[in-house]
Amino acid sequence: MTTPGPTTAEQPWPVRTVTRKIADWISRLGAVWVEGQITQISARPGTSTAFIVLRDPTADVSINLTCATNLVRSMEPPLTEGSRVVVHGKPSFYAGRGTLSLRVDEIRAMGIGELLARIERLRKLLAAEGLFDPRRKRPLPFLPGTIGLVTGRASAAERDVLTNARGRWPAARFRVVNVAVQGVSAVPQVITALGTLDADPEVDVIIVARGGGSVEDLLPFSDEALCRAVAACRTPVISAIGHEPDTPLLDHVADLRCSTPTDAGKRVVPDVAEETQRIGQLRDRARRALRGWVDRECRLLDALRSRPALADPHSPLRRRAEDVEALRERGRRAVRASLGTEEAALSGIRARLTTLGPAATLARGYAVVQGVAQDGGTSVLRSVADAPPGTRLRVRLVDGAVRAVVSDDDTQGERR
């Protein structure tokens, strides 16, 4: 059979050629082991082929399986929708309907031990990446404005969270997003709900709540994709999954782990009665502290008022006035004594000056003879040579002065 050439709009391939080529290419693929969760089983009596839909637990992806009906019926325990399995098969393409399926020749149910082992390996991986580090956990707001709640529709977990939270704080506001909390659609729905609430600026904290259940029922809350989605949330997340003994991986990644949904309702908001009592206690403490401070200040004022400076403020002023007056009197006496001493010294000097002065000499009968110049100036004569005949003289006596003229006769004088 010849191989058709390249296709063009004028020379297209028929459908049978395309499906044959796809089938030839897929038939060259080898067998693979695949893990997933069964979402649908169709094994009708009287048929030799069973049809199964296998879904990825963490993504909205599924694949059809075909196998012998006896293979399904021989499984112990029987396969049911929601079972986690590992299958071995080879991809095949059915050209008649153009569908791809996995032809399975072996199915292994995943037991609890194997599931727990896988969870433990994932726990170690996430811990090594630091997703469990207490330092990355964010503190919860004291009083959140809006609380996001991710839980099952009309579930006991939802009722417990709402009842306990509103019982403690009646004004608490919730934004509830109902999702599947078990089964194949639980993980994608919870991740979508987390993204919606995390993007809401009014939501201050998110609670992921579910009631108790078996290990298989709680498997979605140990899923790697869900754990990483919680770690990536900017809003603090509270995990309230199952009962006290239940510890899915979500508990380690969340910012706060609560043992039950009831515990989450109690811890997400404060108790209004306790806060009212605490406010009353703080008011009493503040009142006592204020009263104590006022009492201390009053005692201090009383002590200050009882001191002499404030009890009789005029007394210090009087004492200071008396001191000033005494100092002024001492100053007067000192000045007077100093003036008396200086006056006595001055009198002594005056007496000496009087005794030694020319007036005293004149009083004893002496006279001072001065020559009078033409311009009226005078000069004391100290020698007869200074008074030639005709010299005008001024003779100063004790009680006045007389004028004279020097004559030729030394024995006579002319009084003028």
Image (spheres, rainbow, N blue to C red):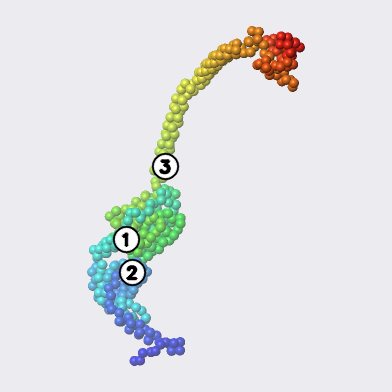
For disc 3, the neighbor class at 10 Å (few under 14, some 14 to 19, many from 20) is: few
- Residue 11 image position (x, y, % from top left): 43, 89
- Determine which residue is flagged by label 1: 129
Farthest right residue?
Answer: 416
- Determine which residue is flagged by label 3: 276
Farthest bottom residue?
Answer: 1
> Would residue 354 appear left or right of 238 to someone viewing this image?
right
Q: Is residue 328 visible?
A: yes
Residue at the spot 52% in from the left edge and 18% down from the top edge? 327
> Disc 1 or disc 2, which is closer to the eye?
1
Relative vertical location of residue 305 with respect to residue 183 in this rendering, above or below: above
What quarter of the picture does the C terminus occupy? Answer: top right
Residue at the spot 45% in from the left edge and 58% down from the top edge? 200
Q: CA distance from mark 1 to mark 3?
A: 43 Å
Q: Do the residues under discs 1 and 3 have CB atoms within 8 angstroms?
A: no
User: Which structural element holds mark 1?
Assistant: loop
